[in-house]
């Protein structure tokens, strides 16, 4: 086999990407592509795992057995999604422990939406409908991402998540058909989760430092602003149908663009929350570190048991 | 990194009788029994399967993607291995 120069390898790599040929774990890839994927996929994995916390908060207080069973299934799915994504991260040559330690040390982030508290039952509706809705918008696009293991994980996750959004919308719709107090509770959840949901798509294209390169590598297939617009366009009629108001005085249908125009996002708030100063950042990481530390002896015991029974 | 990290397992699932087991992903588990149980919880929450295989990833021998062009070239160049290579006289519709 002739040895190819780095330059040749990089050329062949980009040609594969341009031809929409998926990259698989042992294929040659530029170091920067690998690093970019590790960052994005592990961030995604952490979001699934940390995302279990705000909803776990309401499992014991779900208003009926049906809602409780549904919420449990949803949270269990999120654990599964985190695992698919940690496995995908590992195919890039980083250990799972290292990946998790990077979350705990704050080196790698997770979706800033999970740093907001879940104050009422209606928040379970808002999260399912808006937060999972935004996540699905992003994840459907990622089903065609250039890295094989990531794309396959996304396909599986998208299949499973469609019920997540529906159950959330069902909660909101039920509340909106309820008493005045229930309608207020739903609207309050909407008011608190709308803007953070829009922030989930990340900084605007002009500000996003990763978008351009990620698009060239086809890790991302749509820009943050494109996905955010699709989300607004999809969500507004859904809100209107059940009588929820979008908390944005500047929201208006733009006939010429064929899209909704919407108000300016408070990026200062976004960067504050990303930077660790959201309402629940500290609590979330503490919960994850506690889970790891307190589970240590269980993992060790299981390993010791396995070794003993091997010999 | 602790030396106690659970080994990695590859998971294969038969979705229904009559089909092959197919690779669906991987997971970490201390032993085969727990790998099976975890595989059930992680990969078959929606009736995806009726049978699971787990294999320790370290036990798999794989071909090298860097060699794949040369390695699989012989099967590309022998077009006469495919039925479309052969001319049939008019009048034969199915063969």
Image: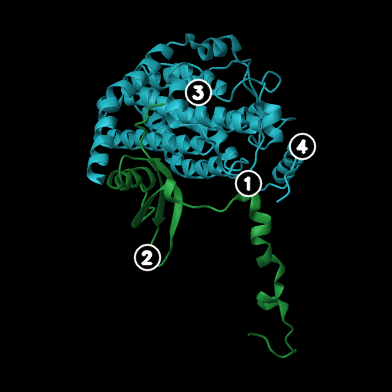
Q: Is mark 2 on a helix, strand or loop?
A: loop
Mark 3 nearby-residue class (10 Å; few <14, some 14–19, many ≥20): many
Instruction: Give above or below for B39 relative to B95.
Output: above
Q: Mark 4 points at which residue?
A: A7
Q: Is mark 4 on a helix, strand or loop?
A: helix
- In the rendered structure, which disc, 1 or 3, sits on the residue that comes first in sequence? 1
Circles 2 and 4, Cβ within 8 Å, touching? The answer is no
Q: In this view, does A260 lie to the left or right of A133?
A: right
Real-space Cα separation, disc 1 to disc 2, in angstroms = 30 Å
Q: What element carries label 1?
A: loop
Rendered colour, chain A: cyan
Tell me the number on the disc at residue A22. Answer: 1
Res A92 → quadrant:
top right
Where residue A50 appears, as percent x and y from the top left, is 41, 24
Q: Name the residue under label 2.
A: B17
Circles 1 and 3, Cβ within 8 Å, touching? The answer is no
- Residue displayed at 72% across by 77% down: B85
Where residue A19 appears, as percent x and y from the top left, is 72, 47
Rendered colour, chain B: green
Real-space Cα separation, disc 2 to disc 4, in angstroms = 48 Å
């Amino acid at each position: 086999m002739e040895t190819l120069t780095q330059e040749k390898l990089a050329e062949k790599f980009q040609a594969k990407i341009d031809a929409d040929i998926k990259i698989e774990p042992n294929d040659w890839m530029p170091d920067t592509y690998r690093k970019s994927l590790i960052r994005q996929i592990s961030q995604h994995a952490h979001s699934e795992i940390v995302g279990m916390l705000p909803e776990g908060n309401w499992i014991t207080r779900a208003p009926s057995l049906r809602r409780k069973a549904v919420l449990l299934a949803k949270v269990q799915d999120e654990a599964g999604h985190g695992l698919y994504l940690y496995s995908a991260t590992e195919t890039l040559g980083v250990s799972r422990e290292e990946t998790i330690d990077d979350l705990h040390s704050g080196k790698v982030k997770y979706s800033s939406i999970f740093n907001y508290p879940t104050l009422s039952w209606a928040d379970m509706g808002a999260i399912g409908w808006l937060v999972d809705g935004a996540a699905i918008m992003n994840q459907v696009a990622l089903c065609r991402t250039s890295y094989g293991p990531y794309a396959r994980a996304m396909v599986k996750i998208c299949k499973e998540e469609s019920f997540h959004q529906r159950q959330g919308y069902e909660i909101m719709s039920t509340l909106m058909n309820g008493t005045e107090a229930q309608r207020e509770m739903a609207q309050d959840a909407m008011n608190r989760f709308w803007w953070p949901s829009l922030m989930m798509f990340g900084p605007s294209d002009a500000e996003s430092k990763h978008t351009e390169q990620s698009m060239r590598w086809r890790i991302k297939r749509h820009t943050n602003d494109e996905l955010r617009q699709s989300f607004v366009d999809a969500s507004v009629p859904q809100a209107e149908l059940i009588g929820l108001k979008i908390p944005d005085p500047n929201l208006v249908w733009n006939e010429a663009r064929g899209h909704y125009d919407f108000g300016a996002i408070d990026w200062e708030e976004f960067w504050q929350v990303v930077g660790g100063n959201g309402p629940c950042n500290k609590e979330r990481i503490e919960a994850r570190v506690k889970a790891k530390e307190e589970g240590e002896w269980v993992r060790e015991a299981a390993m010791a048991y396995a070794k003993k029974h091997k010999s | 990194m602790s030396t106690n990290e659970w080994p990695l397992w590859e998971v294969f699932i038969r979705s229904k009788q009559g089909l092959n087991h197919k690779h669906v992903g991987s997971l970490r588990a201390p032993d085969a029994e727990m790998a099976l149980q975890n595989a059930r919880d992680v990969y078959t929450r929606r009736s995806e399967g009726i049978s699971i295989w787990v294999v320790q990833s370290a036990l798999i021998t794989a071909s090298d993607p860097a060699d794949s062009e040369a390695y699989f070239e012989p099967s590309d160049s022998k077009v006469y291995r495919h039925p479309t290579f052969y001319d049939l006289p008019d009048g034969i519709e199915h063969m």
